[in-house]
Image (tube, grey):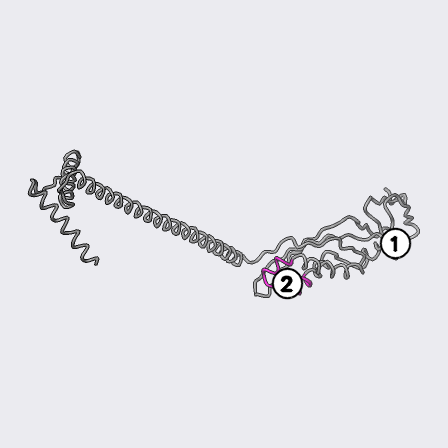
Amino acid sequence: MGNLFCCIQVDQSTVAIKERFGKFEEVLEPGCHCLPWFLGSQLAGHLSLRLQQLDVKCETKTKDNVFVNVVASIQYRALANKANDAFYKLSNTRTQIQAYVFDVIRATVPKLNLDDVFEQKNEIAKAVEEELEKAMSAYGYQIVQTLIVDIEPDEHVKRAMNEINAAARLRVAANEKAEAEKIIQIKRAEGEAESKYLSGLGIARQRQAIVDGLRDSVLGFSVNVPGTTAKDVMDMVLVTQYFDTMKEIGAASKSSAVFIPHGPGAVRDVATQIRDGLLQASSHHQ
Protein backbone atom coordinates (compact mmCIF):
# COMPACT_ATOMS: atom_id res chain seq x y z
CA MET A 1 0.00 0.00 0.00
CA GLY A 2 2.93 2.35 0.77
CA ASN A 3 4.39 1.77 -2.66
CA LEU A 4 1.03 2.58 -4.17
CA PHE A 5 1.08 6.03 -2.55
CA CYS A 6 4.84 6.46 -3.17
CA CYS A 7 5.66 6.24 0.57
CA ILE A 8 7.94 3.79 2.32
CA GLN A 9 8.93 3.22 5.97
CA VAL A 10 12.49 2.54 7.08
CA ASP A 11 12.78 0.89 10.52
CA GLN A 12 15.17 1.88 13.28
CA SER A 13 18.79 0.55 13.01
CA THR A 14 18.16 0.05 9.30
CA VAL A 15 18.84 2.06 6.17
CA ALA A 16 17.28 1.70 2.74
CA ILE A 17 18.99 1.98 -0.62
CA LYS A 18 17.15 4.18 -3.12
CA GLU A 19 17.79 3.84 -6.83
CA ARG A 20 16.55 5.80 -9.82
CA PHE A 21 16.32 3.97 -13.10
CA GLY A 22 18.64 1.28 -11.64
CA LYS A 23 21.32 3.70 -10.44
CA PHE A 24 22.13 4.35 -6.80
CA GLU A 25 20.72 7.70 -5.72
CA GLU A 26 20.83 7.94 -1.91
CA VAL A 27 20.67 6.17 1.44
CA LEU A 28 17.37 6.58 3.25
CA GLU A 29 17.56 6.98 7.04
CA PRO A 30 14.96 5.46 9.42
CA GLY A 31 11.54 7.09 9.05
CA CYS A 32 9.00 7.75 6.29
CA HIS A 33 10.18 8.64 2.80
CA CYS A 34 8.54 9.53 -0.48
CA LEU A 35 9.48 7.26 -3.36
CA PRO A 36 7.79 8.36 -6.62
CA TRP A 37 7.97 5.16 -8.59
CA PHE A 38 6.44 6.83 -11.64
CA LEU A 39 9.59 8.99 -11.86
CA GLY A 40 11.84 5.93 -11.91
CA SER A 41 12.62 5.79 -8.19
CA GLN A 42 12.63 2.40 -6.57
CA LEU A 43 13.79 0.70 -3.38
CA ALA A 44 16.81 -1.56 -4.01
CA GLY A 45 16.79 -3.08 -0.54
CA HIS A 46 17.45 -2.62 3.16
CA LEU A 47 20.72 -2.84 5.08
CA SER A 48 20.81 -3.58 8.82
CA LEU A 49 23.13 -1.47 10.98
CA ARG A 50 22.86 -3.80 13.96
CA LEU A 51 25.83 -5.64 15.40
CA GLN A 52 26.07 -9.09 13.86
CA GLN A 53 28.08 -12.14 14.88
CA LEU A 54 29.63 -14.85 12.77
CA ASP A 55 31.19 -18.00 14.23
CA VAL A 56 33.83 -19.53 11.99
CA LYS A 57 35.23 -23.03 12.64
CA CYS A 58 38.58 -23.61 10.99
CA GLU A 59 40.59 -26.84 10.98
CA THR A 60 44.34 -26.42 10.79
CA LYS A 61 47.61 -28.03 11.91
CA THR A 62 50.06 -26.82 14.54
CA LYS A 63 53.84 -26.72 14.30
CA ASP A 64 54.11 -30.06 16.16
CA ASN A 65 51.73 -31.72 13.63
CA VAL A 66 48.56 -31.74 15.72
CA PHE A 67 45.26 -31.04 13.96
CA VAL A 68 43.02 -28.62 15.84
CA ASN A 69 39.66 -26.98 15.25
CA VAL A 70 39.80 -23.25 16.01
CA VAL A 71 36.49 -21.45 16.48
CA ALA A 72 36.61 -17.68 15.95
CA SER A 73 33.70 -15.39 16.79
CA ILE A 74 33.57 -12.25 14.61
CA GLN A 75 31.36 -9.32 15.62
CA TYR A 76 30.82 -6.77 12.83
CA ARG A 77 28.36 -4.18 11.52
CA ALA A 78 27.75 -2.05 8.46
CA LEU A 79 28.69 1.64 8.62
CA ALA A 80 25.87 4.08 7.96
CA ASN A 81 28.13 6.53 6.09
CA LYS A 82 29.32 3.71 3.81
CA ALA A 83 26.01 1.94 3.41
CA ASN A 84 26.19 2.06 -0.41
CA ASP A 85 29.57 0.26 -0.38
CA ALA A 86 28.29 -2.34 2.08
CA PHE A 87 25.22 -2.95 -0.05
CA TYR A 88 26.77 -3.02 -3.53
CA LYS A 89 30.38 -4.19 -3.18
CA LEU A 90 29.80 -7.53 -1.44
CA SER A 91 27.30 -10.11 -2.55
CA ASN A 92 27.90 -12.39 0.46
CA THR A 93 29.43 -10.65 3.46
CA ARG A 94 29.57 -13.73 5.73
CA THR A 95 31.41 -15.82 3.14
CA GLN A 96 33.93 -13.03 2.59
CA ILE A 97 34.64 -12.70 6.33
CA GLN A 98 34.94 -16.47 6.66
CA ALA A 99 37.53 -16.59 3.89
CA TYR A 100 39.70 -13.97 5.60
CA VAL A 101 39.44 -15.79 8.94
CA PHE A 102 40.53 -19.06 7.33
CA ASP A 103 43.47 -17.32 5.68
CA VAL A 104 44.78 -15.70 8.87
CA ILE A 105 44.30 -18.70 11.15
CA ARG A 106 45.91 -21.12 8.72
CA ALA A 107 48.84 -18.73 8.35
CA THR A 108 49.31 -18.18 12.11
CA VAL A 109 48.59 -21.45 13.91
CA PRO A 110 51.06 -23.62 11.91
CA LYS A 111 53.88 -21.46 13.33
CA LEU A 112 52.99 -22.40 16.92
CA ASN A 113 53.13 -25.57 18.99
CA LEU A 114 49.90 -26.86 20.48
CA ASP A 115 50.61 -25.49 23.96
CA ASP A 116 51.52 -22.10 22.48
CA VAL A 117 48.24 -21.99 20.57
CA PHE A 118 46.33 -22.13 23.87
CA GLU A 119 48.61 -19.55 25.48
CA GLN A 120 48.60 -17.12 22.54
CA LYS A 121 44.95 -17.27 21.50
CA ASN A 122 44.60 -13.54 22.19
CA GLU A 123 47.44 -12.81 19.76
CA ILE A 124 45.74 -15.00 17.15
CA ALA A 125 42.46 -13.14 17.65
CA LYS A 126 44.27 -9.81 17.32
CA ALA A 127 45.92 -10.90 14.05
CA VAL A 128 42.52 -11.96 12.65
CA GLU A 129 40.92 -8.68 13.72
CA GLU A 130 43.66 -6.54 12.15
CA GLU A 131 43.46 -8.38 8.84
CA LEU A 132 39.67 -8.22 8.74
CA GLU A 133 39.66 -4.53 9.66
CA LYS A 134 41.95 -3.69 6.75
CA ALA A 135 39.99 -5.80 4.29
CA MET A 136 36.39 -5.09 5.34
CA SER A 137 36.73 -1.33 5.88
CA ALA A 138 36.96 -0.98 2.08
CA TYR A 139 33.55 -2.62 1.80
CA GLY A 140 31.78 -0.43 4.36
CA TYR A 141 32.00 -2.79 7.35
CA GLN A 142 33.51 -2.30 10.80
CA ILE A 143 35.03 -5.21 12.73
CA VAL A 144 34.00 -4.56 16.33
CA GLN A 145 35.53 -7.57 18.09
CA THR A 146 37.25 -10.84 17.25
CA LEU A 147 37.41 -13.66 19.78
CA ILE A 148 38.95 -17.14 19.71
CA VAL A 149 36.26 -18.94 21.67
CA ASP A 150 37.42 -22.55 21.32
CA ILE A 151 40.53 -24.56 20.47
CA GLU A 152 39.72 -28.23 20.18
CA PRO A 153 42.47 -30.77 19.37
CA ASP A 154 41.78 -34.27 18.16
CA GLU A 155 40.20 -36.56 20.75
CA HIS A 156 43.26 -38.82 20.90
CA VAL A 157 45.50 -35.80 21.47
CA LYS A 158 43.29 -34.54 24.31
CA ARG A 159 43.36 -37.97 25.94
CA ALA A 160 47.15 -38.08 25.66
CA MET A 161 47.47 -34.58 27.14
CA ASN A 162 45.24 -35.57 30.06
CA GLU A 163 47.33 -38.71 30.65
CA ILE A 164 50.54 -36.65 30.64
CA ASN A 165 49.05 -34.23 33.14
CA ALA A 166 47.78 -37.06 35.33
CA ALA A 167 51.18 -38.79 35.24
CA ALA A 168 52.93 -35.58 36.24
CA ARG A 169 50.56 -35.08 39.16
CA LEU A 170 51.01 -38.71 40.27
CA ARG A 171 54.78 -38.26 40.12
CA VAL A 172 54.57 -35.19 42.35
CA ALA A 173 52.25 -37.03 44.74
CA ALA A 174 54.64 -40.01 44.88
CA ASN A 175 57.57 -37.72 45.65
CA GLU A 176 55.63 -36.00 48.41
CA LYS A 177 54.54 -39.34 49.86
CA ALA A 178 58.11 -40.71 49.77
CA GLU A 179 59.40 -37.54 51.44
CA ALA A 180 56.78 -37.88 54.18
CA GLU A 181 57.66 -41.55 54.76
CA LYS A 182 61.35 -40.59 54.90
CA ILE A 183 60.65 -38.01 57.59
CA ILE A 184 58.58 -40.54 59.56
CA GLN A 185 61.37 -43.14 59.41
CA ILE A 186 63.99 -40.58 60.44
CA LYS A 187 61.87 -39.44 63.39
CA ARG A 188 61.18 -43.06 64.37
CA ALA A 189 64.90 -43.89 64.24
CA GLU A 190 65.74 -40.79 66.27
CA GLY A 191 63.10 -41.80 68.82
CA GLU A 192 64.41 -45.35 69.05
CA ALA A 193 67.98 -44.09 69.46
CA GLU A 194 66.91 -41.68 72.19
CA SER A 195 64.89 -44.43 73.88
CA LYS A 196 67.83 -46.86 73.82
CA TYR A 197 70.16 -44.17 75.12
CA LEU A 198 67.84 -43.37 78.01
CA SER A 199 67.29 -47.09 78.70
CA GLY A 200 71.04 -47.71 78.80
CA LEU A 201 71.49 -44.69 81.03
CA GLY A 202 68.84 -46.03 83.38
CA ILE A 203 70.39 -49.50 83.49
CA ALA A 204 73.81 -48.00 84.17
CA ARG A 205 72.41 -45.91 87.01
CA GLN A 206 70.55 -48.94 88.36
CA ARG A 207 73.72 -51.02 88.37
CA GLN A 208 75.68 -48.18 89.93
CA ALA A 209 73.07 -47.93 92.69
CA ILE A 210 73.29 -51.70 93.28
CA VAL A 211 77.07 -51.53 93.49
CA ASP A 212 76.91 -48.56 95.84
CA GLY A 213 74.37 -50.34 98.01
CA LEU A 214 76.45 -53.52 98.18
CA ARG A 215 79.56 -51.52 99.01
CA ASP A 216 77.79 -49.67 101.80
CA SER A 217 76.37 -52.96 103.10
CA VAL A 218 79.78 -54.65 103.13
CA LEU A 219 81.45 -51.68 104.82
CA GLY A 220 78.69 -51.27 107.37
CA PHE A 221 78.57 -54.98 108.20
CA SER A 222 82.39 -55.19 108.50
CA VAL A 223 82.40 -52.26 110.92
CA ASN A 224 79.52 -53.47 113.07
CA VAL A 225 80.57 -57.16 113.14
CA PRO A 226 84.29 -57.39 113.93
CA GLY A 227 86.21 -60.27 112.42
CA THR A 228 84.07 -60.58 109.23
CA THR A 229 85.62 -60.23 105.84
CA ALA A 230 84.18 -58.86 102.63
CA LYS A 231 83.82 -62.42 101.35
CA ASP A 232 81.65 -63.38 104.31
CA VAL A 233 79.42 -60.37 103.77
CA MET A 234 79.04 -61.08 100.03
CA ASP A 235 78.12 -64.71 100.76
CA MET A 236 75.43 -63.55 103.15
CA VAL A 237 74.11 -61.02 100.65
CA LEU A 238 73.95 -63.68 97.96
CA VAL A 239 72.10 -66.04 100.34
CA THR A 240 69.60 -63.27 101.08
CA GLN A 241 69.12 -62.53 97.38
CA TYR A 242 68.72 -66.26 96.72
CA PHE A 243 65.91 -66.62 99.25
CA ASP A 244 64.22 -63.44 97.99
CA THR A 245 64.29 -64.84 94.44
CA MET A 246 62.80 -68.16 95.61
CA LYS A 247 60.08 -66.19 97.41
CA GLU A 248 59.20 -64.23 94.30
CA ILE A 249 59.09 -67.36 92.14
CA GLY A 250 56.75 -69.04 94.58
CA ALA A 251 54.52 -66.00 94.96
CA ALA A 252 53.98 -65.55 91.20
CA SER A 253 50.73 -67.31 90.19
CA LYS A 254 51.68 -67.86 86.55
CA SER A 255 55.30 -68.86 86.94
CA SER A 256 56.60 -71.87 85.07
CA ALA A 257 58.13 -74.75 87.00
CA VAL A 258 61.80 -74.16 87.76
CA PHE A 259 64.01 -77.00 89.01
CA ILE A 260 67.06 -75.81 90.93
CA PRO A 261 69.18 -77.46 93.61
CA HIS A 262 68.12 -76.38 97.09
CA GLY A 263 69.92 -76.43 100.38
CA PRO A 264 72.74 -74.63 102.16
CA GLY A 265 75.32 -76.42 100.03
CA ALA A 266 73.51 -75.29 96.91
CA VAL A 267 73.67 -71.69 98.08
CA ARG A 268 77.42 -71.99 98.54
CA ASP A 269 77.71 -73.46 95.04
CA VAL A 270 75.70 -70.56 93.62
CA ALA A 271 77.90 -68.03 95.39
CA THR A 272 81.02 -69.79 94.15
CA GLN A 273 79.76 -69.83 90.55
CA ILE A 274 78.88 -66.12 90.65
CA ARG A 275 82.23 -65.22 92.19
CA ASP A 276 84.13 -67.33 89.64
CA GLY A 277 82.20 -65.71 86.80
CA LEU A 278 83.03 -62.22 88.05
CA LEU A 279 86.72 -63.10 88.41
CA GLN A 280 86.86 -64.61 84.89
CA ALA A 281 85.16 -61.53 83.44
CA SER A 282 87.68 -59.30 85.21
CA SER A 283 90.66 -61.32 83.92
CA HIS A 284 89.36 -61.22 80.31
CA HIS A 285 88.77 -57.47 80.62
CA GLN A 286 92.35 -56.96 81.70
Which region shows up in magenta?
A: 102-120
The percent coordinates of residue 211 (x first, y second) are: 23, 45
Residue behind mark 1: 19
Residue 115 lies in the magenta stretch:
yes
First-in-chain label (1 vs 2)? 1
Label 2, residues with CA under 10 Å away: few <14, some 14-19, many ≥20: many
Q: Secondary structure at mark 1?
A: strand
Residue at point 26%, 43% (across, down) = 209
The correct choice, above or below, for 217 with respect to 136 in the image is above
How many angstroms separate mark 1 from mark 2 (CA)? 45 Å
Residue at point 77%, 52% (across, down) = 77
Quadrant (top left, top right, bottom left, bottom right) of the N terminus: top right
Count of number-bearing discs: 2
Q: Which mark is residue 109?
A: 2
Q: Is residue 182 left or right of residue 149?
A: left
Residue at point 62%, 54% (across, down) = 150
